[in-house]
Image (spheres, rainbow, N blue to C red):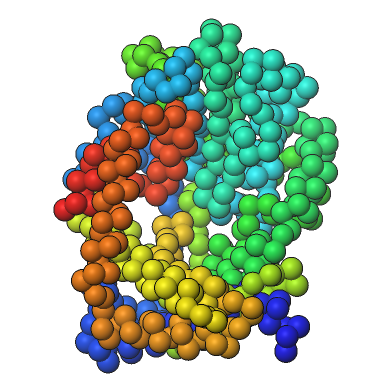
C-alpha cells in the first residue's frame, strides 16, 4: 500500500450531486444560481463554434467599470485592435505584445501541435529576415531572446513579446518590422520546418514532467468528451514529425488574421505618434474570406453523483486530497456587481485556507497545507475545489478532515473574526497596489494587459480595484 500511496498526488472526490444535496439539507447557498444547477449533471452542453467579429467589443464597453484612463484603445478598419499605455518606468523603454486569439484548441486532429510549432517558425524566416538573421540581429540590439522570453502558446491564445532596451530608431524599426512579419510574413519553408522538428520533439520530452502528466489525467477524467482534454499545446509526436507544410500554412492563414489580433504597446512613448506607427504598420493587413472558426469544445458533462478519481505518477513526492465541483461556465460581463459577487467567494475561499493553515500547525497534524479556490478555464468550465496536502502520505487521515471542513462551512458558515481578518488583508493588499502604482514596470503591465484580453476583464486602475473591494 505504501508503494501506491507514495505515487499519488491527487485523490479527487468529484463533487456534483453530493454538493447540491448538502445545500438542500442546510437550506444555504454559496452562489445564487446553485438551485438551478442541480440538474446540470443530466445535461450535456454543446458549445457551438463562431467566427470572429471585426468589431469585437472591449471589455469596458460591456461594463460599468471604467478602464484605466491612461490606456488608449483603438481599432483598425481590418478589425485589428491596439492598446497604447504610456509608462515611464523604466524610462526610454517600451514593451510590445502581439496577442492572437488562437491556440491549440483551434487545431484539427492532424494539426495537434502546429499552433505551438508556428510560434517557433516565426523566428525561422520571414519576408524581411532570413532564418539565420533575425535572432542575431535582435541580440545585437540588446533585445532578449530565449525560451519563453519572446512568445508562448496556450490552448486559446498565442502571444509574442518584445521588450526594447531603448527607443533608438533602429531598434523600434526592427521590432515593428518583426511584429508585422509575424502577422502575415512568415515563410514557413519546408526546409526550416523539417529543421525545427527535432527542436520541438526535444521540447516535448522536456515538458513530459510529473505536473503535465497529472494534468492530462485530470483533464481526461473531468472532461473526457471535450476537446480541451485532447489539445495540449505541445501536441502529438507523429504530427510534429510528419505534418506537411500545407497544414502549417492552413492554420497560419486561417487564424493569424487581424480580426483575431490585438497589439499592445506600453512604455515611454507618445500616444499620437505611436498610434500613427501602428496604423502605418498593420493597416494593410487583410482578413481571409473564410476565417478560422472559434474552437468547438464538445461536451462538458458534470457527473450526476459522487465520483472518486486517483491520479498518480511515480515521480510524485506528495499527496493531495480534494473535493471538486465542475460545471459549465456562464459568461458574464466584468461588471461591478459581478466582481463583488466573485469577491464574496474569494473571501470564503481565503477563510477556508486559513482554517487549513491552523490545522496544519497542530501537533502531529496529518495536514501539511490546505487550499480552497475557484477558477475558470477558457471561459467554458468553472472549477471549485477545497483540499489539503497530506503530511507523510497520510491521505487516509485527511479525507475526513476535508469532508468535515466542507460540511462545517455549509452548515455553520464563518465567524465575524474570520471575515474581518480576510477583509483587512484584501484591503491592505489593494492599498499597497495603489502605492506601488508609480513604480510599475512596462513589461509586466504589457503582459498583464495581454492577459486580460481573452478573459474579457477590464484593465482598471489600482484605485478602482480598491474602491470595489472597499464597497
Extreme residue toward the left, this view: 471
Extreme residue toward the bottom, this view: 25
In the image, is residue 421 above or below residue 248?
Answer: below
In the image, is residue 278 above or below residue 455?
Answer: above
**Along the horizontal axis of the image, is 2 left or right of 304?**
right
Say which of 441 and 297 sits in front: 441
In the rendered image, residue 312, in percent from the top left (x then y), is placed at 68, 75
Instruction: Give the quarter of the image for residue 352.
Output: bottom left
**Along the horizontal axis of the image, is 5 left or right of 296?**
right
Q: Name the residue: 64% across, 80% down.
A: 393
Say which of 419 and 176 sits in front: 419
In the image, is residue 123 above or below residue 391?
Answer: above
Extreme residue toward the top, this view: 169
In the rendered image, residue 356, in percent from the top left (x then y), is placed at 43, 74
In the rendered image, residue 368, in percent from the top left (x then y), is placed at 54, 73
Q: Name the residue: 56% across, 27% down.
A: 162
In what quadrant of the picture does the N terminus appear? bottom right
Q: Name the residue: 61% across, 65% down.
A: 215
In the rendered image, residue 431, in percent from the top left (x then y), is placed at 27, 43
**Along the horizontal axis of the image, is 377 left or right of 469?**
right
The answer to whether residue 471 is visible is: yes
Amino acid at each position: 500500500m505504501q508503494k501506491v500511496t507514495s505515487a499519488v498526488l491527487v485523490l479527487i472526490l468529484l463533487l456534483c450531486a453530493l454538493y447540491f444535496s448538502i445545500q438542500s439539507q442546510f437550506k444555504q447557498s454559496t452562489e445564487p444560481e446553485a438551485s438551478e444547477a442541480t440538474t446540470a449533471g443530466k445535461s450535456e452542453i454543446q458549445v457551438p463554434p463562431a467566427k470572429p467579429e471585426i468589431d469585437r467589443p472591449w471589455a469596458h464597453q460591456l461594463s460599468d467599470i471604467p478602464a484605466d484612463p491612461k490606456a488608449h484603445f483603438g481599432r483598425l478598419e481590418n478589425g485589428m485592435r491596439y492598446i497604447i499605455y504610456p509608462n515611464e518606468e523604466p524610462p526610454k523603454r517600451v514593451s510590445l505584445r502581439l496577442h492572437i486569439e488562437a491556440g491549440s484548441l483551434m487545431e484539427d486532429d492532424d494539426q495537434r501541435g502546429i499552433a505551438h510549432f508556428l510560434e517557433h517558425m516565426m523566428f525561422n524566416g520571414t519576408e524581411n529576415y532570413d532564418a539565420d538573421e533575425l535572432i542575431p540581429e535582435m541580440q545585437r540590439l540588446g533585445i532578449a531572446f530565449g525560451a519563453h522570453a519572446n512568445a508562448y502558446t496556450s490552448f486559446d491564445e498565442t502571444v509574442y513579446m518584445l521588450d526594447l532596451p531603448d527607443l533608438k530608431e533602429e531598434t523600434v524599426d526592427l521590432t515593428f518590422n518583426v511584429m508585422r512579419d509575424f502577422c502575415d510574413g512568415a515563410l514557413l519553408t519546408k526546409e526550416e520546418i523539417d529543421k525545427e522538428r527535432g527542436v520541438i520533439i526535444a521540447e516535448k520530452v522536456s515538458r513530459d514532467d510529473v505536473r503535465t502528466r497529472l494534468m492530462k489525467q485530470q483533464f481526461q477524467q473531468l472532461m473526457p468528451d471535450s476537446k480541451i482534454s485532447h489539445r495540449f499545446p505541445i501536441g502529438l509526436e507523429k504530427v510534429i514529425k510528419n505534418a506537411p507544410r500545407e497544414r502549417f500554412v492552413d492554420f497560419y492563414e486561417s487564424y493569424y488574421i487581424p480580426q483575431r489580433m490585438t497589439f499592445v504597446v506600453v512604455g515611454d512613448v507618445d500616444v499620437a505618434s505611436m498610434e500613427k506607427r501602428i496604423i502605418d504598420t498593420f493597416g494593410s493587413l487583410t482578413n481571409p474570406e473564410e476565417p478560422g472558426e472559434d474552437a468547438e469544445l464538445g461536451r462538458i458533462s458534470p457527473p450526476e453523483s459522487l465520483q472518486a478519481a486517483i491520479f498518480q505518477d511515480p515521480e510524485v513526492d506528495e499527496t493531495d486530497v480534494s473535493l471538486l465541483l465542475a460545471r459549465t461556465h456562464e459568461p458574464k460581463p466584468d461588471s461591478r456587481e459581478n466582481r463583488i459577487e466573485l469577491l464574496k467567494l474569494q473571501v470564503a475561499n481565503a477563510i477556508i485556507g486559513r482554517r487549513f493553515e491552523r490545522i496544519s500547525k497542530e501537533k502531529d497534524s496529518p495536514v501539511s497545507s490546505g487550499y480552497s479556490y475557484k477558477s475558470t478555464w477558457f471561459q467554458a468550465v468553472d472549477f471549485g475545489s477545497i483540499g489539503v496536502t497530506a503530511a507523510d502520505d497520510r491521505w487516509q487521515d485527511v479525507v475526513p478532515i476535508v469532508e468535515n471542513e466542507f460540511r462545517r462551512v455549509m452548515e455553520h458558515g464563518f465567524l465575524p473574526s474570520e471575515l474581518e481578518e480576510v477583509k483587512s488583508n484584501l484591503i491592505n493588499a489593494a492599498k499597497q497596489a495603489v502605492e506601488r502604482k508609480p513604480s510599475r514596470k512596462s513589461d509586466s503591465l504589457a503582459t498583464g494587459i495581454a492577459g486580460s484580453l481573452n478573459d474579457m476583464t477590464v484593465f482598471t486602475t489600482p484605485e478602482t480595484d480598491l474602491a470595489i473591494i472597499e464597497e
